[in-house]
Image: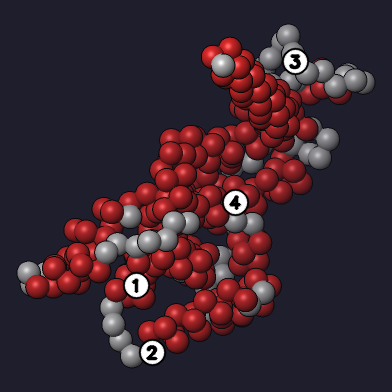
């Protein structure tokens, strides 16, 4: 009897070990597939133009890496200015978005006013409007106000997000009502309760939407391309096209890859720093009760 039990335990352990091994193999293969484009981008960026063009068969390594492409990225076009413009645009847009999103989510989740649910449903219906229609409307408005080629014109249409308000509202709603009622009994005002209780509890979700907004702003292409034709207001996403057309040329792929690495690095670092908070915020947003 004991031998049968021991045999079953061994078989279960062996099956579990095989399962884990297969899982790790599949994950390793998937990681290689996902990370290979980044590796190829960095590898190409450290090859000089002559050696890259001499490769009839692409090589997966280089014995003579060079950083001259990175130096060229900042001299062929004003990439430093594009970086500064993008930082200004990203910081101001993200900050204004939080100023709008957090109080709106608090109002929809905690304050009681007539027609709240109807207003929130109508608000959510805005997500059904195609992005192209919104862009056309925003472009007409910004043009009529004379805000083209200004940071105000770049920022204003992006200071709110229905999805982020919805995500934060659902997160706020998970906080027990008893805390709110107890705070009201103690004479705590709504704004103080928001900053002292709700924001600290929901910090992972707020960090998540902040990081997502930063990524969205950093990668923004269509809207900046529409409202700016002055190079003084170009962002890095639009600067890539400028680099390709008037900087290195279409054939200098290593230099282009160096510029892309420089532009992508801040987002990669941002994700690595806040990855745990992002996962925690997404998990909280998907948990009810």
Q: CA distance from mark 3 to mark 2?
A: 63 Å
In percent of width and height, residue 211 lies at 46, 49
Quarter of the picture containing the N terminus is top right
Mark 4 or mark 2: which comes first in sequence? Answer: 2
In the displayed structure, would residue 18 be above or below residue 171?
above
Which residue is at 66% across, 26% downward?
A: 19
Query: Where on the picture, by quarter, is residue 76?
Result: top right
Which residue bears the numbered disc 3?
A: 61
Q: Which mark is residue 115?
A: 2
Which residue is at 42% across, 61% downward?
A: 288
Which residue bears the numbered disc 4?
A: 219
Q: Is residue 232 left or right of residue 172?
A: right
Q: CA distance from mark 1 to mark 2?
A: 13 Å
Mark 3 or mark 4: which comes first in sequence? Answer: 3
Mark 1 or mark 4: which comes first in sequence? Answer: 1
Q: CA distance from mark 3 to mark 1?
A: 54 Å
In percent of width and height, residue 13 lies at 59, 19
Where disc 2 sits, the SS reads loop
In the displayed structure, would residue 205 be above or below residue 83?
below
Circles 3 and 1: CB atoms closer than 8 Å: no
Comparing labels 4 and 2, the label whose residue is closer to the camera: 2
Q: Is residue 121 left or right of residue 105?
A: right
Tag 4: Cα neighbours inside 10 Å, few (<14), some, or many (≥20)? some
Where disc 1 sits, the SS reads helix
**Residue closest to the eye, 64 or 61:** 61
Which residue bears the numbered disc 1?
A: 109
């Amino acid at each position: 009897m004991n031998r049968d039990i021991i045999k079953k335990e061994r078989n279960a352990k062996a099956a579990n070990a095989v399962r884990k091994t297969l899982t790790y193999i599949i994950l390793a293969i998937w990681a290689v597939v996902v990370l290979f484009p980044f590796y190829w981008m960095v590898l190409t960026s450290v090859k000089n133009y002559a050696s890259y063009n001499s490769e009839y068969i692409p090589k997966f390594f280089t014995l003579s890496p060079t950083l001259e492409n990175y130096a060229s990225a900042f001299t062929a076009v004003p990439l430093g200015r594009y970086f500064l413009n993008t930082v200004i645009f990203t910081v101001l847009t993200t900050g204004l978005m939080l100023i709008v999103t957090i109080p709106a989510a608090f109002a929809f989740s905690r304050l009681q006013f007539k027609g709240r649910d109807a207003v929130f449903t109508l608000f959510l219906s805005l997500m059904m409007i195609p992005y192209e229609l919104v862009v056309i409307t925003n472009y007409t408005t910004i043009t009529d106000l004379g805000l083209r080629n200004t940071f105000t014109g770049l920022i204003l249409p992006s200071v709110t997000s229905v999805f982020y308000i919805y995500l934060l509202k659902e997160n706020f709603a998970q906080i027990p009502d008893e805390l709110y009622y107890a705070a009201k009994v103690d004479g705590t005002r709504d704004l103080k309760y928001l900053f002292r209780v709700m924001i600290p509890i929901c910090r992972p979700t707020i960090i998540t939407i902040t990081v997502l907004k930063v990524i969205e702003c950093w990668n923004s292409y269509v809207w900046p391309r529409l409202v700016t034709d002055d190079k003084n207001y170009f962002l890095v996403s639009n600067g890539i096209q400028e680099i390709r057309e008037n900087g290195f040329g279409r054939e200098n792929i290593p230099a282009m890859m160096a510029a892309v690495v420089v532009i992508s690095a801040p987002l990669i670092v941002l994700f690595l720093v806040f990855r745990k908070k992002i996962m925690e915020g997404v998990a909280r947003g998907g948990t009810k009760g």
